[in-house]
């Protein structure tokens, strides 16, 4: 019979069509919405670098004040000390250091003397900003209104100048140690490693060979370019 080859061919064709490629049958069936890509982690922020302030312009102040090269007293003596003093560590070992000394306040052509007191207080690092030291510095004075503390301040300073131990009965010493309210300000290192205090017009501090401090605080409002406080202060506690 001639029908048998046709039947065989049809059977072969049906079998071939029933076989699907392995790749299609193995492909998983996707259901639902596609999974969104994972969010990128937020960028980490780092504190911006803060440029160190310039050093005190000692040469300009000397020129304005017409300082002698060998000045031994007054504002010019303080400026001369800046030429050889070393960097001061404002973070004192005790966490609360105090100094007292003689200050010279320049206002135009007028210079007046006063008793200058300084405090350096250690503060936690998380309380200061980028570039700042973990210490706040307060600069003040003992005035006539402070009574016995004012009248005995000179005696205390002369004792400290000789590196002697002052008597505990000195009223200025007691006042300085017990004073709690100070006009504090943040501190930074200058380019030349002086300590810059962000108070009034800015103050600059360095240290002498006997732990005394040399300090120049620019006046916030200046009638003259050299207006401000020039002081040498001796340590009472640190």
Image (tube, grey):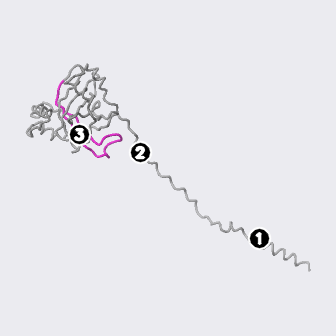
Rendered-image quadrant of the N terminus: bottom right
At x 50%, y 54%, the residue is 39
Q: Left or right? Give the position of 93 relative to 151.
A: right
Q: Position of residue 162 (x, y in %)?
A: 13, 33
Q: Nearer the viewer, residue 220 or 153?
A: 153
Disc 1 is placed on an element classified as helix
Crowd tier of the residue under label 3, counting other residues whose Cα lies within 10 Å: few below 14, some 14–19, many 20 or above? many
Q: CA distance from mark 2 to mark 1?
A: 66 Å
- Of all residues shown, which one is farthest toward the bottom? 1
As drawn, the label of residue 17 is 1
At x 50%, y 52%, the residue is 40
Let me know if residue 136 is in the magenta part. yes
Q: Left or right? Give the position of 52 relative to 227.
A: right
Closer to viewer: mark 3 or mark 1: 3
Task: Give the quarter of the image for residue 92.
Answer: top left
Magenta-drawn segment: 112-140
Choose the circle earlier in sequence order: 2 or 1. Answer: 1
As drawn, the label of residue 46 is 2
Choose the circle earlier in sequence order: 2 or 3. Answer: 2
Q: Residue tagged by mark 3?
A: 120
Choose the circle earlier in sequence order: 3 or 1. Answer: 1
As drawn, the label of residue 153 is none
Task: Give the quarter of the image for residue 5.
Answer: bottom right
Q: CA distance from mark 2 to mark 3?
A: 28 Å
Q: Nearer the viewer, residue 155 or 151?
A: 155
**Tags 2 and 1 touching, CB below 8 Å:** no
Disc 3 is placed on an element classified as strand
Q: Main secondary structure of the magenta part?
A: strand
Q: Is residue 51 above or below residue 38?
A: above
Q: Nearer the viewer, residue 210 or 133?
A: 210
């Amino acid at each position: 019979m001639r029908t048998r080859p046709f039947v065989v061919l049809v059977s072969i064709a049906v079998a071939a069509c029933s076989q699907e490629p392995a790749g299609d049958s193995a492909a998983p069936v996707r259901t639902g919405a596609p999974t969104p890509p994972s969010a990128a982690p937020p960028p980490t922020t780092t504190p911006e670098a803060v440029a160190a302030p310039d050093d005190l312009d000692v040469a300009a102040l000397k020129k304005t004040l017409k300082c002698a090269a060998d000045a031994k007293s007054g504002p010019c003596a303080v400026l001369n000390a800046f030429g050889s003093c070393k960097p001061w560590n404002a973070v004192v070992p005790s966490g609360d250091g105090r100094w007292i000394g003689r200050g010279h306040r320049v206002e135009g052509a007028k210079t007046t003397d006063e008793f200058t007191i300084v405090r350096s207080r250690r503060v936690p690092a998380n309380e200061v900003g980028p570039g700042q030291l973990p210490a706040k510095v307060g600069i003040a004075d003992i005035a006539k209104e402070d009574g016995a503390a004012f009248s005995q301040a000179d005696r205390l300073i002369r004792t400290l100048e000789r590196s002697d131990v002052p008597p505990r009965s000195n009223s200025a010493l007691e006042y300085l140690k017990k004073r709690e309210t100070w006009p504090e300000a943040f501190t930074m290192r200058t380019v030349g490693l002086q300590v810059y205090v962000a108070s009034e017009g800015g103050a600059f501090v360095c240290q002498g060979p006997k732990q005394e401090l040399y300090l120049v605080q620019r006046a916030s409002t200046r009638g003259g370019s050299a207006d401000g406080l020039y002081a040498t202060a001796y340590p009472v506690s640190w």
